[in-house]
Amino acid sequence: MTKRQSISNLVNSLKEKKISVQELFDQFHKVAKENKNNSYNLVLDPDYQKSNIETSQERYSTGTNLPLDGIPLGIKDLFCTKGITTTASSKILSNFIPQYESFVTQQLLNDGAIFIGKNNCDEFAMGSSNETSHFGPVVNPWRNQNKPSEQLVPGGSSGGSAAAVAEGSCVASMGTDTGGSIRQPASLCGLVGLKPTFGSCSRWGIVAFASSLDQAGPITNSVEDAAYILNSISKHDFNDSTSSNHKRDDYLKDIDKKLDHKIKIGIPSDYLKNVTSEITAQIENTKKSLAGYDVEFVDVAFETTDYALSTYYIIAPAEASSNLARYDGIRYGVREEGGNLDDIYLNSRTSGFGDEVTRRILIGTYVLSAGYYDAYYRQAQKVRRLIKDDFQRVFQEVDFILTPTTPNEAFKIGEKLDPIAMYMNDVFTVPTSLAGLPGISLPSGLSSNGLPLGIQIIGNYFQEKKLLQLSHLIEKELSFNE
Amino acid sequence: MSDIDIKRISYLAKLKLPSEKEEFYSQSLEDIIQWVDNLKKIETSNVKPLHNVTETTVSIRNDDIEKNNTTEEVLKNAPERAQNFFKVPKVVE
């Protein structure tokens, strides 16, 4: 992978007129247009962006440029974009053109960003390999150096976003994370992926999967780029009742500030029970990289880790089955004809959803159905509280928690057929999601196959500023991108 | 876990599984339900269910009417329409 230019470098080059907004757009658009890794469901035409590019250039000329002015971004095809087809990588939404802009993408537009296109993802964000997309799998730009002909998954569900940034067709991409869908693909593609605290970024206009878990966040080449994007998108929004109205920090300011007090980082021994030595080495390398700083590493133990995946695979499908009830072929989306109204519902839904989405709707319907609600759904919500309390207990002892992001490197497309084996990919990211805590995945090294591996750092609620400062330091010390 | 009635569940979900796929989904559902069954052994009688992790966040707005879109925009994605309505087959005789 070649060294990428950071957002701050690009903004400076644009300011100093070393490059024009049009030239920058063309450079990325050219790679995106080839779409050789199938990371885009749609690449926007240069003509479509002409006036946006011109007004951005105009602002640079008059010295009134905005924080993300002229920066080419990819957008997961789960964000509603006004007038631009938004499919959630599903057949049932394959013809859907939103009449409004999602809150998060509107903030990016307000800050001058220019969209390259809509990134492929797992259908309705349900998957960990980007293989469930109606528009075909995304290919990871990385190759196993011992088996270079094999096509690997980029992770998921924001697999198109990660592949797009890794292949250099956009500077950064917006993803969403429900149980690991930003952090896991970022890890498998050697990138930074930030899932903010639940409630930081409005869910308004994001195609809903599991409303108590879904959160938007960036996939970027660097921690600093993640801070740029977070500054833009983390805002209160009255259209999302779970949007938090706390005062936001400036995440860029002092990002390279030296640690001025001792910090404690917890390493959960239960996370490392069954992982390979390559994965453990990522944690060890991180510890070593911080040896020269006032950082104490302590062993911590969770009591609920073994229950997190089960809890997630009850709550997320339950919410999904409710959220996806809206796709009925009546008001929008693809309609399949039928003799009566009920047949239209049945035919449209049956033909419109792929296997994994159907499976999750069935799980969700089952755990919410009469006679099973208390045993499964209500019990899962209670265990979710225990998981949250477990994290709060550990955060009384430590400032951050360090874990691997994934239990494995990128695997071959078509290799994991068993759904439960696929769900295990998110074993380290799901607990954080259930607790609603912020988590970031950082590239930490390469496997013996030459594939990227990542670490996850978890912070306490709304501590994104401190999380990014520490991540910036670790990134520098690990020097993955050098 | 033989008590999963796949026909009933798919009916509740408004899905018409093709008969050759019923077995596939039924088996898959059984496997997953068995996998998540470990939650049952956790003692939770004194635990309150957690619906929203940011329980302390209050984000209520006044229910004021705002006109953000037009009838045309709302109907733009309709598979079938008649004047200002979504069109479906006749429901009431």
Image (cartoon, coloured by chain):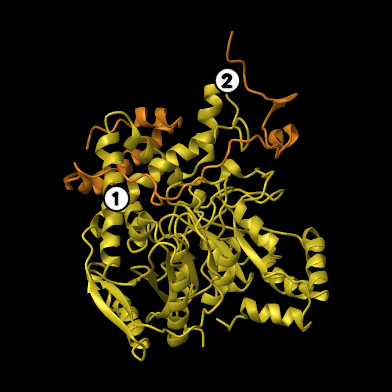
Q: Chain of mark 1?
A: A
A115 shown above or below A26 = above
- N-term-proximal mark, 1 vs 2: 2
Q: Is residue A147 visible?
A: no
Q: Which mark is residue A99?
A: none
Amino acid beneath label 2:
Gly
Q: Position of residue A243 (x, y in %)?
A: 51, 51
SS at badge 2: loop
A216 shown above or below A220 = above
Amino acid beneath label 1:
Arg
Tell me what residue is drawn at x 27 percent, y 45 percent: A382
Disc 1 packing (10 Å; few <14; some 14–19; many ≥20): many
Q: Identify residue for label 1.
A: A385
Q: Chain of mark 2?
A: A
* Contact between labelled residues 2 and 1, with CB atoms less than 8 Å apart: no
Task: Tell whether A409 sits left or right of A109.
Answer: left
Nearer to me, A395 or A318: A395
Disc 2 packing (10 Å; few <14; some 14–19; many ≥20): few
C-alpha span from label 1 to label 2: 47 Å
Q: Number of labelled discs?
A: 2
Which chain, by letter, is yellow?
A
Tell me what residue is drawn at x 61 percent, y 52 percent: A103
Tell me what residue is drawn at x 56 percent, y 75 percent: A252
SS at badge 1: helix
Q: Colour of chain B?
A: orange
Nearer to me, A437 or A248: A248
Task: Tell whether B26 sits left or right of A123.
Answer: left
Q: Identify residue for label 2.
A: A339
Q: Nearer the viewer, mark 1 or mark 2?
A: 1
Q: Position of residue B43 (x, y in %)?
A: 16, 46
- As drawn, the residue found furthest toward the top would be B93
